[in-house]
């Protein structure tokens, strides 16, 4: 499979490594506006070929990933889509999806976002196993090609990831809370401790483990994060307002010396964190669900989004058009008895009869 990677940094480089290590016959063509980054990607074995232009990297690709900072993605998508063939799926890895709204009008474009990474930058830190077990959000539109969605899903599975469909706007609101807020808070925490040290006229004698854990992502790659903050500024600002309100509530309980409130608040946080972390790890026996759908645009996106919305993970999928091309057979593999039951109910509620094999 020929794969184009535009922007060969931490994430683009990891895609290149994952493809070259795990996808039979993969040939990765990379491009980056920074010639040194491109050279380092070649040295690291993250790409097979250093392409001289976007067009050359994309020319005969079957899949193309846009891996530049979010602020550069819209223009890059336009260029890549103009150069890509009719059968090439074009995706991106941007941490926010709103900037790709125009590109998403093309049936070959399916937005994406791996929830894996690091506070580091550049291909030096890229890893072929970076996406193992990681959720990889996909944002198909009703007009997105079902065939290309399936190809992308399969490729991401080969990278070790767990693709999950979600609407672009929901994705951005969710990420504001789940990823962007922790990055803002890490920066604020560092600032608070520096200010406390100055106020006390004391150097900080020792860094507590809790401080180290909670501030790991402080000051992450500015080239990437300033773009994310700007692209999702309204949703992040809203999250910060909610956070301020929550902090005020804690401050009030502290001033009042409200032991019962503090105990209950702390217990609820422990239980909620445990549930969130364990839910991420939950797996189970694989169920194979097959159903026939009419061959109309949007049907794959409709099914994938319905399951994604209810937290049902599609472990694997295949799509087989009938010979007359008027219908197609979709097979989904769902891990866990309860998620499989839920998936079946959801698919049936969309009007499709499900057979379990
Ligand atoms: N770092 C992380 O943990 C994660 C990052 N992302 C997203 O992945 C994307 C890339 O981030 P990283 O790989 O971490 O950054 P990076 O800084 O390691 O790599 C970015 C690369 O893009 C190149 N670039 C800059 N402008 C470009 C353009 N116009 N066209 C093509 N390439 C261009 C840079 O030269 C650099 O090599 C960002 O959109 C980010 O939001 C997504 C998930 C995780
Ligand atoms: O290092 C971490 O914990 C991260 O949070 C990495 C990360 C950064 C940006 C993303 O859009 C997704 C994941």
Image (cartoon, rainbow, N blue to C red):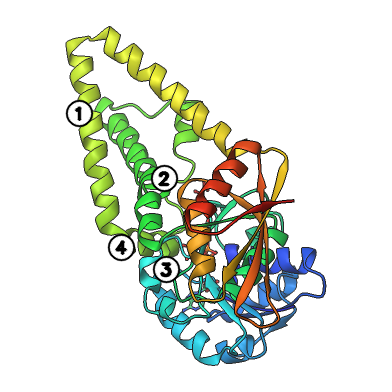
Q: Which residue is mark 1?
A: 248
Earlier in the chain: of badge 4 and badge 2, it is 2
Task: Work out whether residue 161 or residue 50 is closer to the camera in this orientation and state it.
Answer: 161
Residue 246, picture quadrant:
top left
| Element carrying mark 2 | helix
| Element carrying mark 3 | helix
Residue 171, picture quadrant:
bottom left
Crowd band around label 1 with a 10 angstrom C-alpha radius: few (<14), some (14–19), many (20+): few
Earlier in the chain: of badge 1 and badge 4, it is 4
Q: Which residue is mark 3?
A: 70
How much space separates mark 1 and mark 4, taking CA atoms? 26 Å
Earlier in the chain: of badge 4 and badge 3, it is 3
Q: Which residue is mark 2?
A: 178
Task: Work out whether residue 54 or residue 273 is closer to the camera in this orientation and state it.
Answer: 273
Task: Work out whether residue 325 or residue 28 is closer to the camera in this orientation and state it.
Answer: 325
Crowd band around label 2 with a 10 angstrom C-alpha radius: few (<14), some (14–19), many (20+): few
How much space separates mark 4 and mark 2, taking CA atoms? 17 Å
Distance from mark 3 CB to nearest ligand 1 atom below 8 Å: yes
Q: Residue at x 64, y 58 (%)?
A: 125
Distance from mark 1 CB to nearest ligand 2 atom below 8 Å: no
Q: Which residue is mark 4?
A: 230
Earlier in the chain: of badge 3 and badge 2, it is 3
Which is more foreground, mark 1 or mark 2?
2
How much space separates mark 3 and mark 2, taking CA atoms? 18 Å
Q: Position of residue 320 (x, y in %)?
A: 69, 72
Quadrant containing the N terminus in the rendered view: bottom right
Q: Position of residue 58 (x, y in %)?
A: 61, 86
Earlier in the chain: of badge 1 and badge 2, it is 2
């Amino acid at each position: 499979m020929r794969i184009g990677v535009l922007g060969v940094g931490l994430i683009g480089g990891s895609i290149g490594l994952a493809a070259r290590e795990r996808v039979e016959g993969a040939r990765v063509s990379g491009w980056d506006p920074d010639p040194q980054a491109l050279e380092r990607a070649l040295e690291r074995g993250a790409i097979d070929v250093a392409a001289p232009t976007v067009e050359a990297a994309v020319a005969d690709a079957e899949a193309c990933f846009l891996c530049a900072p979010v602020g550069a993605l819209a223009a890059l998508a336009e260029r890549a889509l103009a150069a890509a063939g009719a059968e090439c799926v074009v995706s991106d890895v941007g941490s926010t999806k709103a900037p790709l709204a125009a590109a998403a009008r093309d049936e070959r474009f399916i937005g994406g976002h791996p929830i894996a990474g690091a506070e580091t930058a550049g291909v030096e830190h890229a890893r072929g196993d970076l996406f193992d077990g990681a959720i990889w959000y996909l944002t198909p539109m009703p007009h997105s090609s079902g065939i290309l969605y399936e190809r992308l899903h399969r490729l991401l599975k080969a990278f070790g990831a767990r693709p999950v469909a979600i609407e672009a706007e929901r994705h951005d609101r969710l990420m504001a809370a789940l990823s962007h807020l922790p990055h803002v808070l890490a920066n604020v925490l560092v600032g608070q401790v520096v200010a406390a040290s100055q106020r006390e006229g004391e150097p900080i004698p020792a860094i507590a483990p809790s401080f180290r854990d909670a501030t790991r992502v402080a000051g992450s790659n500015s080239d990437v994060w300033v773009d994310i903050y700007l692209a999702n500024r309204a949703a992040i600002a809203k999250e910060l307002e909610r956070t301020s309100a929550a902090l005020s509530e804690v401050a009030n309980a502290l001033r009042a010396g409200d032991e019962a409130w503090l105990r209950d608040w702390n217990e609820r946080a422990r239980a909620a964190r445990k549930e969130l972390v364990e839910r991420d790890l939950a797996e189970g026996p694989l169920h194979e669900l097959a159903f026939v759908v009419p061959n109309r645009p949007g049907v794959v996106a409709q099914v994938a989004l319905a399951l994604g919305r209810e937290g049902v993970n599609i472990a694997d999928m295949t799509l087989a058009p009938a010979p007359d091309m008027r219908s197609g057979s979709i097979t989904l593999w769902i891990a866990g008895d309860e998620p499989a039951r839920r998936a079946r109910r959801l698919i049936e509620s969309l009007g499709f009869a499900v057979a379990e094999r």
